[in-house]
Amino acid sequence: MATTTSNTMVQLPSELRFFTVLESKPPSMGPRLGSIALKGRIPMQTPHYIALSSRGAVPHVSQDIMRKHTRITGVYVALEDFIEKAPREVPPIYNIPPSRTNSPLRQFIALQQDALLVLGPRRSPPVPCPASNTHIAISILTSVGFRRLESEDYVDAARELRPDIVVGMGDLVLGKRSGLKRVEKMGDRTTAWTQEMIAGIRDKENASVNAPRPLVFAPILPVEQEQQSMYLNQLQDEMKDNVHGLALYDAESFSVIPNSLLDLPRLSFDEPSSPQEVLRNISLGMDILTIPFVDAATDAGISLDFFFPCCSESQQEAPVSLGLDMWSSQHASDLSPLRSGCQCYTCSKHHRAYIQHLLTAKEMLGWVLLQIHNHQVLDEFFAGIRRSIRSGTYAEDKEMFEKLYERRLPEKTGQGPRVRGYQFKSSGSGESKKNALAYKTLDETAENLADASLPSPSVEASDLEERGFGEKA
């Protein structure tokens, strides 16, 4: 496999030279190996993933547990998680005293110093908003309802909070198709917002302290190349020297990237729902990915169990499951670890029966232990991907994986942890409850009997059983 060097990065100052393409098929198409290195951060070998957060924390994992028992090297944080009080009040996140040596955002969420911190305007995956974006703002969903986030405010936040990387604001349309006129607006707005972000980050006069500035990742719109050609032209002609990476919301958008920007790192928000889709994204040249299904699996009580590359061809007739449903009663007396040979804290200290007991008892520790294990599986999965690319067998290994494993994760069978209102958009009246009732009548049968009328002598036995008056012998 040919080795390439990033010409774009060579032109940058030394403090911004943070991404190197190690191995790639010319011209930077297909899977490639890279390295991301920022001063004071754990070097990240790519392809890799960054963990998604909820209000600054990886779901089910506190910051101290993340440091001790996971190998997470990067975290994505959404600004909409913290600005529900704006603009009437100053959000608490902006009250952290500025420091040259530490990011106020990192201090506020208590993130470890050596983890890569990425800031974006919205969660991943984002909840569609009823109101459309405007020429100066996007619609967001905070913990108290829908709001607007203006480009100027987002630039101010990036400058004040100082993440390692800030993802530029893009005019994205969620949940519906865009007409031609709407697509034209998307390109124009994204161009203006990206230029505003670059200018704001470079503005030394308004900087709170003389500290390192965030690196800007420019969004690539999920539309055809012709429909965003003006934006792409300005990106490579006028903004290239100040853009340090690309954020893609559809892996297929790789084909629209101009050749002069192919050496930049690519951050994917494509929302893969299975390991097979992750492999597909990497085949298209993605460097850093966000993986929503790992949190969804943990919420569902699923213990992930897959390897890449596969050890050998399986002789099983049915495809192998991608995980174990830990709600199943078959694990109630199973003293084996979640996965044989796994070195994570969960598998080293506990067994399946204990995890199944915790889930059944609705103990939050059950989801904590599952999340630790599932991130370990993901870390080993990406390490295997990098070995496969390095050895030149990625295409064959990917094909074998797709033959061996099922296409989807196991279905959820138990009641997961309570979901938050700002994580889901209501679909209207008649929608079923997403959370089970927390409190129920202590003696529901007695209450039903008190309200029921007495049965007649000619009533059927099945009716008596249905109404709670008796059971069949």
Image (tube, helix red, strand yellow):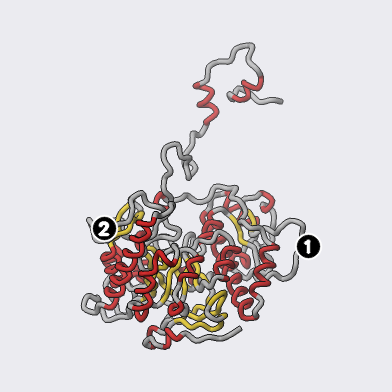
The answer to whether residue 110 is visible is: no
- Front of the two marks 2 and 1: 1
The mark found on residue 315 in the picture is 1
- Residue 436 image point, x, y percent: 49, 42
Q: CA distance from mark 2 to mark 1?
A: 59 Å
Q: Nearer the viewer, residue 313 or 142?
A: 313
Residue ranking furthest to the top: 457
| Amino acid at circle 1 | Gln
Q: In which image quadrant can residue 454 be found?
A: top right
- Residue 226 image point, x, y percent: 42, 66
Q: Are there few (<14), some (14-19), or many (20+) residues within 10 Å of tag 1?
A: few
- Is residue 467 placed above or below 417 in the rendered structure? above
Find disc 2 in the rendering and name its residue. 86
Q: Is residue 165 left or right of residue 452?
A: left
- Is residue 44 placed above or below 468 in the rendered structure? below
- Under circle 2, the secondary element is loop
The answer to whether residue 58 is visible is: yes
| Amino acid at circle 2 | Ala
Residue drawn 33% across and 73% down? 162
Q: Quadrant of the N terminus?
A: bottom right
Residue drawn 41% across and 83% down? 39
